[in-house]
Amino acid sequence: MTKATIGILGGSGLYELEGIAGLSSVEVETPFGPPSDAIAVGALGDVKVAFLPRHGRGHRLLPTEIPFKANLWALKSVGVERILSVSAVGSMREDIRPGDLVIVDQFVDRTRQRPSTFFGRGLVAHVSFADPVCADLGRLLVEAGSTLGLRMKKGGTYLCMEGPAFSTRAESSLYRSWGVDVIGMTNLQEAKLAREAEICYATIAMSTDYDCWHEEEEDVSVESVLRVLRSNVENVRRLLAAVVPKVPSRRACPCARALAHAILTAPEAVPADTAAELDLLVGKYLRHPPSAG
């Protein structure tokens, strides 16, 4: 199977990635059903990348319908160690304008209907999630964006809502009182599952609107979102082309060993079918448990 170490998850407005050479389409089977679409694998410069549109080409999947576990599993299975996630968001702050990019570093979960873990079925693991974004990957994005002169904010909190409807005015005001920076519908589950899969994860949040809290701006609508997305997507393509060649081949961050001391279940107590299903993630730890400390 064709391998790639960097994965790109495209969101609203980014259903394909221009500039990938030697493109091949990879169909991946997972224990959790099919991913959102086939994975496009090719080279961006001299680096192998894997691109997956989370809503499917043609934007066929609601945020709640996205097969998050299948998507992360599929990317892991083709060798991905780092994910750059692109997502359209609403701004909850005056100084984050439509068209700005935010490299978020925190999440708040307001979803209700989505699986957010690979574990269960006789296998218990609790990964650390205090810092949900890979700091090394986030730093590279900020540095590349600064070099390109993009309107970009370093750090920020992404509130992940269920959707698919946009917020009520009361909800928007409540979330602003919590001090969140942007609001979206997709990235929280990806970040959690990436951590469990020991994949570095960072989000490029594309601000498209002011949700519905801003009295001097029009309420958020698909029409207004798409209008800003067109220019945003071009900036994101430039950012990805600039940052991918700068990603080092070796990882020094804790993401790469997130499961090392997270598994509580004794290896001999894990049901055989669960161990087999999750072998891609936990096989090395169940066969050779790390020593305490």
Image (cartoon, rainbow, N blue to C red):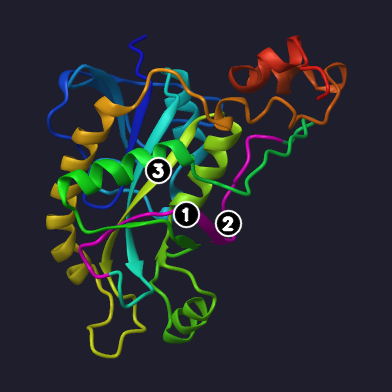
x%, y% of residue 283? 67, 15
Give the residue pinned by disc 2: 113
Q: Above or below — where is 157 with respect to 56?
A: below
Q: Quadrant of the N terminus?
A: top left
Mark 1 and mark 3 lie on one chain; the one further toward the N terminus is 1
Give the left or right position of residue 218, taking residue 168 as reference.
left
x%, y% of residue 223? 18, 69
Tell me the magenta residue range: 97-119
CB atoms of marks 2 and 1 within 8 Å: yes
Give the left or right position of residue 119, taking residue 228 as reference.
right
Residue type at mark 1: give it: Thr
How far apart in space, not on screen, are marks 1 and 3 (Cα)?
A: 26 Å
Residue type at mark 3: give it: Gly
User: Neighbour class for label 3 at 10 Å: few (<14), some, many (≥20)?
Assistant: many
User: Neighbour class for label 1 at 10 Å: few (<14), some, many (≥20)?
Assistant: some
CB atoms of marks 1 and 3 within 8 Å: no
Q: Above or below — where is 222 with respect to 129?
A: below
How far apart in space, not on screen, are marks 2 and 1 (Cα)?
A: 7 Å
Q: Residue at x 18, y 58 (%)?
A: 229
Give the residue pinned by disc 1: 64
x%, y% of residue 257? 62, 25
Give the residue pinned by disc 3: 138
Single out the mark in the foreground, 3 or 2: 3
